[in-house]
Amino acid sequence: MAGIEFLKGHGTQNDFVLLPDPDASLELTPRRIAALCDRQQGIGADGVLRVVRSAALGVDSAGEWFMDYRNADGSLAEMCGNGVRVFARYLVDAGLEVGPEFVVGTRAGDRPVRVHTDSSGDLAVTVHMGPAAVTGTSVAVVSGKQVSGVAVDVGNPHLVSVIDDDVSTLDLSRTPRYDTEVFPDGVNLEFVNVLGPESLRMRVYERGVGETRACGTGTVAAVAAALHLRGDDTGQSTVEVPGGRVSVTVGRGTATLTGPAVFVARGELDAAWWDALD
Ligand SMILES: N[C@@H](CCC[C@H](N)C(=O)O)C(=O)O
């Protein structure tokens, strides 16, 4: 097989290998995804974004292009908020969408996006994330302490714990414990400090990945949970994560996420390496 085109990019340092594959001709096995995302033996990333036509997968979407997102361990996830910004930027840069506004198909449904510049003149992407639904409460155990959390569905599952301890002190080198009866398909775990009425700080342990430097759906879940805990269901906030900062607005039945999308490299995968994996 000829070399396979790839790009490497990130959104607030949540990093991705992007594979343009308009006609769905690549065979993406969990082993190939895990190998690509491996930081020693592969390119290294938190996940893979396959750029594929919705029609090629038989997906019913208002968007011509479908974000086929996979976690670093090869598992599928419904949605990736940082990934969809990188994906949208790629479509515009590659001339596959004229922009600035269009729709991207995802497993969680269609996500309208807008590619624009922010107040500093840097490229930013705003994503309509759909509803951030508070579905209940549960607990997590992190650094040997049990903390309560708010369960939020942003198309994918989250448990947000707003805590008093400084999130920078938490040990996220291994999976925090959570209730597998509440989250049978796993969960993304966010730990949050409230810095002010419109300012949060967050760290995250992502399902299928481990600790990442940012999680877009996680930041939306964090804002929805913080609002819920103070008795509000709408509002806005910035969220500082180890990889940067994003802005989130939670409205009635919808939420938006705004942040950067950056490309750092492009090239070709070695065909022999890829073919030897199955
Ligand atoms: N990093 C993403 C979320 C990716 C999916 C998540 N790990 C899951 O399994 O649900 C984001 O930016 O939202």
Image (cartoon, rainbow, N blue to C red):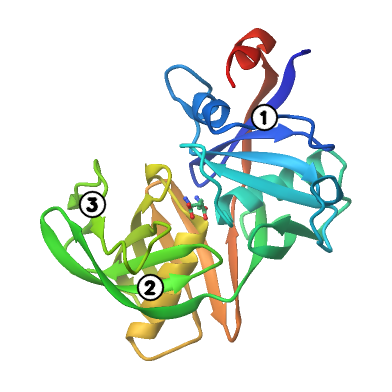
Residue beneath disc 3: 168
Residue type at mark 2: give it: Ala
Residue beneath disc 2: 151
Q: Are marks 1 and 2 in contact (CB under 8 Å)?
A: no
The image quarter containing residue 30 is top right
For marks 1 and 2 on the same chain, the one whose residue lies earlier in the sequence: 1
Q: Position of residue 139 (x, y in %)?
A: 24, 69
User: How crowded is the residue under tag 2: few (<14 C-alpha within 10 Å), some, or many (20+)?
Assistant: many
Q: Position of residue 121 (x, y in %)?
A: 67, 52
The C terminus: image quadrant = top right
Residue beneath disc 1: 7
Horizontally, is 138 left or right of 72 in the view?
left
Residue 224 seen in the figure: yes
Question: Most extreme residue toward the bottom, as rendered?
Answer: 231
Of tags 1 and 3, which is closer to the observer? 1
The N terminus: image quadrant = top right
